[in-house]
Every structure is written in C-alpha cells, then in structure tokens.
Amino acid sequence: MANLKEIRNRITSVNSTMQITSAMKMVSAAKLKRAQDAITQMRPYAEKLQDILGNLSSSLDANENPYTQERAVKSVLIVGINSNRGLCGGFNNYIVKEVRRLVANEYKDCNVSILPIGKKMNDALKGTEFAIRGSRLPHQTEKVWDNLNFDSSSEIAENLMERYTEQSFDKVVLVYNAFKNAASQIITTEQFLPVVPSKEVAESNTSNDYIFEPSKKEIVTNLIPNSLKIQFYKALLDSNASEHGARMTAMHKATDNATSLKKDLQLFYNKARQAAITNEILEIVGGAEALNEG
C-alpha cells in the first residue's frame, strides 16, 4: 500500500491544480462574455454586408473589380487562424488538421502557402515549406491577439488583397473556428478572395439591374475593400470567442476531473490510514499477549 505521505502530497498537488483550473475557468468566462458580445453584434452586419457584396459582384464586369476576377487556381493562400495559447481542448489542433487536409486533398495540385495567425499555428508550421515569411507581412500576426481591433485586422486584410491583385495568389481561403456557443465551435473554411456571388444569385437565372449611388467606380473603390476587411475582422472575432469558450469548457472539465480525483485519493488515503492504525493496534495487542504469556 502506498505511503501515507505520498498520498497526502498527491492530494495537495491535485487540490492546487484544481484551484488553478477553476481560476482559469472564471477568467475565460469573463473574457468569453466580452468576446461573445463583440461577435454577436458584428455578425448580422457582416453577413448582410457579405450578401450585398455577393449581389454587387455579380453585376460587375471582371475588369471593373480586381477582387472578383476569377482565374485558374494555381497558387493558393490558406490563412489558418489559431490562438497564441493552449489549454483550450482541441481548439488549435482542429484547425491545424483542417489546414493539412486542404493541402493534402483539395489543393494538392496547387502551389500552397499558409499564413499562420496565432502562435500555435505558427508552431505547427515550423519545419514545413508552406509558412509565409519575410517583410511582406505588415507585422507579426501573433501580435494581433494582444489587442484585437479593426485597425490591426485591416492591416492583414489589406496585405491579402494587395497580394491577390498582384496575382501572387489566385485564391485566398480562411480557416477558423466559428463561434456557436461556449461548448461548441464550428470549423469553417471560407473563401476570402476572389469575391463570389451569393448562393441566391448563383442559383437564380434572373439578372438584377442595379442603380448605383454613388458611382459604380466609387463603390468598387471603397465599399468592396471595406467589406472584405469586415469579413476578415468577423473571422478573427469568431475565432477569439471560440477560443475563450473552448478554454472555459476545457478548464471546467479539468476542474471536475480534479475534484473527482481528489475524492478518490481522499478515500484511498482514509483506507490506507485505517489499515495502518489497524496494523498498529494488532502489533500492540500481539506484543501485550506475548508479555502476558512470558
């Protein structure tokens, strides 16, 4: 039977771990509330704007808008959005697996590059030939999570749009966790560039006539780039809320497991202590009987 001191040490260790995971759960719950409010407020606007963008792109000639120009896909950029930290269950691994699946299957015949957003994605790409390096990046993409806002995400989005118009890539795809609730995240693969018509327009055989106000040129110059920036920002907000939800759930489960383990160890300790006391009593009784017989 294990030494009583070893069991006490294990109980103390499990109790300390339980306090840490419980504190991390509360911190993640507080951060989740803010992140969830941000994405729920942004999502309706972003989705409606994306529908407008899809409808608008169907009415424009390819030469009027560089962001709707579809060409043979020979070079693909996959933007893998992950977090900087772990301890959030399978949140990061799911995105890494999805990115690898896209590289191995859907884009196996293309020249694939991967832009890692988040330290965990960057770590997963070390030693591979896919990760983008160099001064063309606006800043280290890991730092976008230090102060997530529209300005910092717009820098990355502008860089992606610039590379697409320069024909460095024929297609840009975002891979991220879309927020559903604290316990559930949806792995999402979303085409960022080129802009494609909405499903309703694509499935419809009728053509729409639009009256452009201001001019069509101004819409192409201002609305479409801003809409793309908002779509990219929404993906980051989705991933941010998903991360905190995943971490809160993971820490909740860890706390429950630590509580269960502590109860089992306490029961084991009590049994071991009872057995030790019984052995001591038996030794005392045996010694007393030996003295009486003597």
Image (cartoon, rainbow, N blue to C red):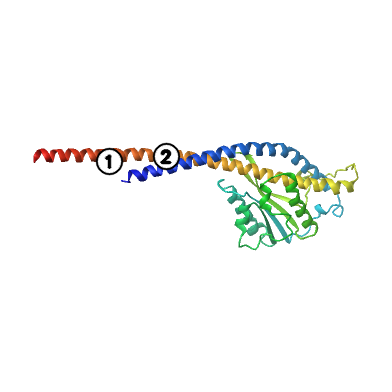
Q: Which one is in front in this view, the residue at disc 2 or the one at disc 1?
A: 1
Residue positioned 83% across, 45% down in the render: 223
Residue positioned 68% across, 43% down in the render: 237
Residue 291 placed where, x, y %?
12, 40
Neighbor class of circle 1 (other Cα within 10 Å; few <14, some 14-19, many 20+) is some
Q: Which disc number belongs to residue 276? A: 1
Q: Which residue is mark 2?
A: 262
Residue 249 visible to the viewer: yes
Looking at marks 2 and 1 on the same chain, the residue that comes earlier in the sequence is marked by: 2
In front here: 242 or 83?
Answer: 83
Residue 133 placed where, x, y %?
69, 60
Residue positioned 76% across, 47% down in the render: 229
Total labels drawn = 2
The correct choice, above or below, for 181 with respect to 156 in the image is above
Gap in Å between the C-alphas at discs 2 and 1?
21 Å
Q: Which of the 4 quarters of the picture holds residue 263?
A: top left
Q: Quadrant of the C terminus?
A: top left
Residue 178 visible to the viewer: no
Q: Which of the 4 quarters of the picture holds residue 122?
A: bottom right
Neighbor class of circle 2 (other Cα within 10 Å; few <14, some 14-19, many 20+) is some
User: For this view, does 184 lie left or right of residue 211?
Assistant: left
